[in-house]
Image (tube, rainbow, N blue to C red):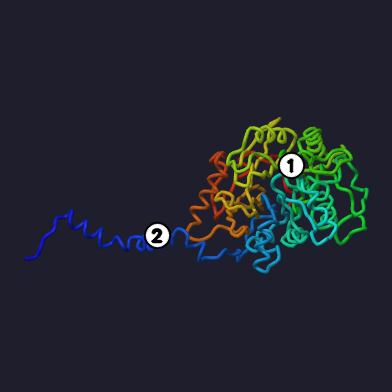
Amino acid sequence: MEQKFTFQERMKLWQIRHKKTALRDSIIAFAVLSIPLFGYSWFIPAEAPEESTREEEVEYRMSMVGDMMMGRHVRDAAEQSNENIDRVFNYVKPFFDDSDYVTGNFESPILDTNDPAVEEEMDDAELHNKDIHLYAEPDAVDALINVGFDSVSVANNHALDFGDLSLDNTLDVAGNKDIELLGIGDALNISEEETVEIEYGPEQGEERNEIDASRVKTFETDNGLTVGILGFTDVFVQGFSASDYVGGVFTSEYVGLTLLRERLQQAKLPEEEGGLGVDIMMIHVHWGDEYQVGYNETQENLGRYMTNYGADIIIGHHSHVLEPVTVMEGRDGHRSIIMNSLGNFVFDQGWSRTKESTIAQLDFLADGTKELSFVPMRLSESMPYETAGPLKPYHDFRIFRTLRKELDSDWWNVEDGRLKVDLDAAGVLEGVETTS
């Protein structure tokens, strides 16, 4: 006679029978379920765009990125793969090739450790009031130039991690290169017509022009506009600040804020009145709190200060994570757009949010309108690439949600995989007209 079991008894027998294989079955189930969630990063490699990244209606484009650190584990990864440091830009070069001007924040000094004099001085030069000391080799500058950077701000809290050694090396190595260093220099309020002797690097003994840390560099666009750009930091270490006769970075210490105001006012003055006659004033600013997704009160106050005196585009960095984009209204109704933080662009940090990034692109369109768009990026092995794979919608949503969080819904839309901000609707760059 066949024995019959109750439901409870059958469940108990099933548990006993599968107890020995439970761990194995769980691992298999987890692996199967993980494929749609994580498989794209395992099996779908990051790739550079194959087609043009620039729409036909874009007449002029400026690209801006956040924190770049090309030393430490970023360099280790390049060496382990038998590649040069240029590898960090493998997946983003087309975006810069399709840009007319490219700028970002360079988060370290340059030290030529192949120079015996530099290597000998490094241990003694390392600042003891800092826990983290960063530096990149001279080939990092070449990598920036090769991929298309026109300028980088070095006004940040790592620029002088090795004191005067890092300051002199950075200026000597990059001072004569085809790239503008912003926010760092031999002193404040100095004539850049004077020259100094190069102490470090292959050009040792030759001359380079002195650099004013507070200088506003200008460039002309193809559509008839003059743009000014400078670097400034509100995050620094004691001893980093440039002043009269003292080299360093352009900070808010001493006369920093007063001089910043003067530089902004002079930039917007017409040339016939002794100014630079710029139509658009851009500022790199290192500020805020590390890993804080939202901006703080100091950022808001400093943003208003810069807006009051003529800043139009404010490029923020330091927190290593993306922060909201805001529109600030200052005196006489003047408005600026503030990218409080563009996050990491090249870095070796491993937290999830530190791997979310973007390329901000200021576009002047054929119909006369102006637009600021954001390309969603992720970091893998310290290298940025455009979001891809099955989780692209999820990553894009996270990135765009952070960036647009405080923007009026009438000002932005998501189109062609980008977050696009209508600057005309937002009242930014009012009165700035192109001649083409």
Image coords of residue 310 (percent x, y): 74, 37
Q: Which of the 4 image quarters holds residue 57?
A: bottom right
Total of numbered circles in the picture? Answer: 2
Q: Nearer the viewer, residue 41 or 431?
A: 41
Residue extending furthest toward the top: 331
Q: Spatial distance from mark 1 to mark 2, Cα to Cα? A: 47 Å
Q: Nearer the viewer, residue 233 or 52?
A: 233
- Secondary-structure class at tag 1: loop
Q: Residue at x 89, y 40 (%)?
A: 245
Disc 1 vs disc 2: which is toward the camera? Answer: 1
Pointer 2: what residue? 30
Image coords of residue 406 (percent x, y): 56, 38
Q: Residue at x 57, y 51 (%)?
A: 356
Q: Nearer the viewer, residue 221 or 376?
A: 376
Q: Residue at x 65, y 68 (%)?
A: 81
Q: For the residue marked with disc 1, what is the amino acid?
A: Asn
Considering only vertical position in the picture, is 434 above or below 238?
below
- Secondary-structure class at tag 2: helix
* Of pointers 1 and 2, the one earlier in the residue sequence: 2
Residue extending furthest toward the left: 1
- Image mark for residue 129: 1
